[in-house]
Amino acid sequence: MPRLTPFPAPTALPDLHGTATLAAAEAVLAQLSGRAPLRIDSVSVTDGPLVRYALAPDLDAMRANRALMEDVVIAALAAPVAARMLDLRQIAGGRDARALLDAALTEPEEREVLDAYLLVLTVRTRALLRRAWAEIGVVAAGLREHGTLDAQDVRHRMACAQGIRGTLLN
């Protein structure tokens, strides 16, 4: 009797819609911040890290400026939080929010509540994502169409989405 050899399990192709949405979520929250370590260089769904930043975060600056640290961590949380909101598979790469927060905290008391602090920032990220969902959708559509957007393209698409929302609500 011949032996049947099983075929390997099919590998799931990357979901372009989901990947573009997660990349757009991080890019939009980074752009909304306007802080130097969150200035994006480009956003891509075709190769390499999805969001490329112009600068790496400076840990000394993050330690000295709590708001800066929180903005950097929130931008790093954007894609994972959006993935949970949409029940999508998380994308690899990007900045590690937990590692950034851990590196920026200096007091032992703060490190004891690291998980709680990260939870608070996760909830704030979720609220920011919901508030900016129109911008995320427009940037994601641009990523699906073009594959890569530079910072100017992202800003333009965000301004268009904000203009449309402002027109519809008035």
Image (cartoon, rainbow, N blue to C red):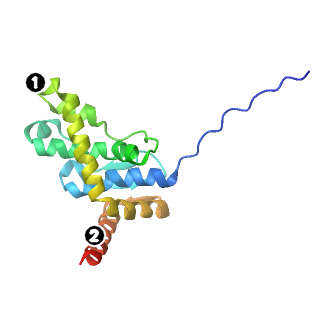
Residue 125 position, x and y percent, is: 26, 47
Mark 1 sits on what residue?
A: 109
> x%, y% of residue 70?
17, 43
| Residue at (31, 60) in percent of width and height | 151
Q: As shown in the figure, which amino acid type bears the numbered disc 2? A: Gln
Image quadrant assignment for residue 12: top right
* SS for dot 2: helix
Q: Nearer the viewer, residue 23 or 148?
A: 23
Quadrant including the C terminus: bottom left
The foreground one among 64 and 164 is 164
Task: In the displayed orientation, state which residue is furthest to the front.
Answer: 169
The reply, left or right, for residue 5 in relation to residue 75 is right
Front-lying residue, 104 or 54: 104
Seen at 22% across and 46% down, the residue is 124
Q: Which residue is mark 2?
A: 162
Measured as percent of width and height from the top left, residue 55 is found at: 24, 47
The quarter of the picture where residue 2 lies is top right
Q: Earlier in the sequence, mark 2 or mark 1?
A: 1
Q: Nearer the viewer, residue 87 or 41?
A: 87
